[in-house]
Amino acid sequence: MSEIKLNDNLFTISTSPHIRAEASISKIMWTVSLALTPAALFAIYHFGTPALFVMLAGSLSAVLFEYIVQKLRGKAITITDGSAFLTGFLLAMCLPPAIPPYMAVVGSFLAIVVAKHAMGGLGYNIFNPAHIGRAALMVSWPVAMTTWTNLSGKVDVVASATPLNILKQQGYAKLVDTFGSAPHMYKALFLGARNGSIGETSTVLLLIGGIYLIYKGYANWVVPVFMIGTVGILTWVCGPTGLFTGDPLFHMMAGGLIIGAFFMATDMVTIPMTKKGQIIFAIGAGAITVLIRLKGGYPEGVCYSILLMNAVTPLIDRFIKPIKFGAREVVKNVR
Amino acid sequence: MYFKYAKKRCGKVIKSFRGGIHPNDNKRFTADKSIEIAVPPSKVIIPVRQHIGAPCSPIVAKGDLVKKGQVIANSEAFVSSPVHASMAGVVIDVAEYPHPVFGKCLSIVIENDGKDEWADGIPLVRDWEKLNGDEIKAIIKESGIVGMGGATFPTHVKLSPPKEKTIDTLIINAAECEPFLTADYRMMLEYSERILTGIKIVMKILGVQKVFIGIEDNKPDAVIAMQKAAEGTTVEVVAIPTKYPQGAEKMLIKVLTGREVPSGSLPMDVGVVVQNIGTIVAIEDAVVKGIPLIQRVTTISGSAIKEPKNLLLRIGTTFEDAIENCGGFIEKPAKIIMGGPMMGFAQSNLKIPIIKGVSGILGLSKKDINTGVQSPCIRCGKCLTVCPCGLNPSMLSILGEKDMYKEAKLEQNLFDCAECGSCVYVCPAKRNIVQYIRYSKMRNNADAAKKKEALSK
């Protein structure tokens, strides 16, 4: 050993592997934000500048709160990784456009400080922070959270209530009436000419963003397909006038289901890690959504269904484990 | 195009194993470079322990004159392998020197006298077909042959399965799934006839007729070369899908035979023996020509190396001398790796000798390694998707981090991990998962050793 001196060309050592792929947390988070951008731009066009102010208040305050909390906790500042921005952005997308921006700030505070950092920070939170923020605002300011004003007047067939509200209070016939006819209603839901939360109205733009995420490998196709599929099948089966009389197309596009299934229920931190677990999660979330929509007190149930399934995620992960190599008896052809 | 061609030649679409990754293979550095005989160094450092099993004891002393191919260290144990002088000259030191795997090891240093003389009776011409299996195995043991893919398990032990195990298939591992490495590929192109002879020798020892050569389909030239060499024999050359870790024994067996080696078992439990291409070449050398394992083909590559090459190197050549053969460095390397970038060992300096299991020496630059700062797991589940062993690497890393190694063993199948590194490669949080797994394994092994000691008292 005497041959080695300290200055003798010493190199870094570590355990293998010595090469890594390009993927990083910040890349994932900013790509998700990018995928939300088309829907956000449409919201500004559709609802006007108040929607922009809510989105700015939500996302920027979330970044600020993240900075403050990380400073207080003595942790490394990771505001540039985009996760806090995304949380605030998603929260704002789930709020009514007419809400005062300060409420979005309160929501971001609850999302970042309570739901995320009180649990230990990124990776440790049990519940989807953006949805916790929304649920808390729903409890705190129920009136502001359910006031749907027709803001822009640019689109003809926007009723002053959300489609799901009309369905809950006045029934399916009145709902179709409001839009003129069923094909008109589907068109409005698909393109976004309806009332609702800032980011949830345009099904087509959310689909484009969601499919982009799946293509990039940052979201799983399993969760959205199974969650939306479950809602479709259950609402069709449990129709208003007997079995198999429901309108699955309406329910699949209405409310926050599309944004919830593609952007909230695919939040890696709060859903199961195995594919099988994700299928259970998605079917459960879809079923609870339908239960709330058809039988519950609220017109919409995506937010609560995802939060409830977040709560059972650790349980799912405990029971659904990958099958290890060599555990299955496929030893064949042995002479 | 190549991909299609390889598939057509095999006549069937091969189903791959579960999981795995597709790193940039970086074989372009050395794929087209013929094997070059390296300049003999001025001295070689030969560790007495270059294999799994009992270490050898030196049988030469400082000042002795040795010849090329002479045994310089040996052991009585069955699971062991003798060490030969790779160079003629004077033994100038028998002392502890750095070792690429064990940190340090008793080594014999030979100074080159420039004569390069063979020991008596080497090389010779042997008609191996007249020998029986046991005689050939004895030659393999005496020649110091070990698994040259990196595992360095003594080959004669691997070729002597217990009587109750029936072996019906021989698999030649030519997947070479590690990025950068091209040594096996070049050997297949340049030594294809010798490889076939080596395979016939092993077939005779094992008494099997069914032989597969598994080659990843990113090496179509090698598939064609081996197919040509294997014409008219029972040896089947199969182009298998390119995916890391295709060269892992259990994955290769699964892909080629459909048999899944049960957890905790060995390939021989499903009737299979796997041999690396390099080992086959060494067997041919030893049995046909009487040349013991004193040299091997090694890929010297990486962005930091001036002129990457495939070199035929003497065992005991230092990394420094080997890299000198490639014109040295063009930039300061970020890491020096023995073996491939996925499972190789990082080395702290260049005074390390090449041992029998060194398939590559890599000088990786910063852009090759792409490290980052580790952050908490974001549960993206990528590691579960790529894990070929069907484990939950995320949970294993968290348990390792929290020192909960017992839970890792009992609840998360810790010991089924092959440490292939696929999980670390894909991790967006840049977690050192394999490091935590190795740590947990070490803690568990230490506990088991302690328990054993307590019981024996």
Image (cartoon, coloured by chain):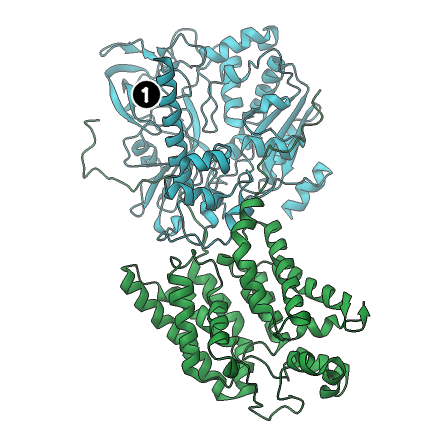
Chain colours: A green, B cyan
Q: Quadrant of the C terminus of chain B?
A: top left
Asked whether A138 or A69 is in front, the reply is A138
Q: Residue at x 63, y 57 (%)?
A: A222
Residue B326, x across and y down, in percent:
36, 38
Residue A17 falls in which quadrant of the image?
A: top left
Asked whether B291 or B168 is in front, the reply is B168
Residue A301, x across and y down, in percent:
60, 70
Q: Amino acid at mark 1?
A: Ile
Residue A208, x across and y down, in percent:
61, 71
Asked if B312 appears above or below A268 in the picture, the reply is: above
Q: Which residue is mark 1?
A: B46
Q: Is residue A193 left or right of residue B45?
A: right
Asked if B124 appears above or below A209 in the picture, the reply is: above
Q: Residue extending furthest bottom?
A: A153
* SS state under label 1: strand
Asked whether B40 or B19 is in front, the reply is B19
Camera sees residue B125: no
For disc 1, the chain is: B
Camera sees residue A279: yes
Residue B93 falls in which quadrant of the image?
A: top left
Residue A48, x across and y down, in percent:
52, 88
Q: Residue at x 45, y 44 (%)?
A: B29
Q: Is residue B453 left or right of residue A49?
A: left
Crowd tier of the residue under label 1, counting other residues whose Cα lies within 10 Å: few below 14, some 14–19, many 20 or above? many
Q: Is residue A72 left or right of residue A225?
A: left
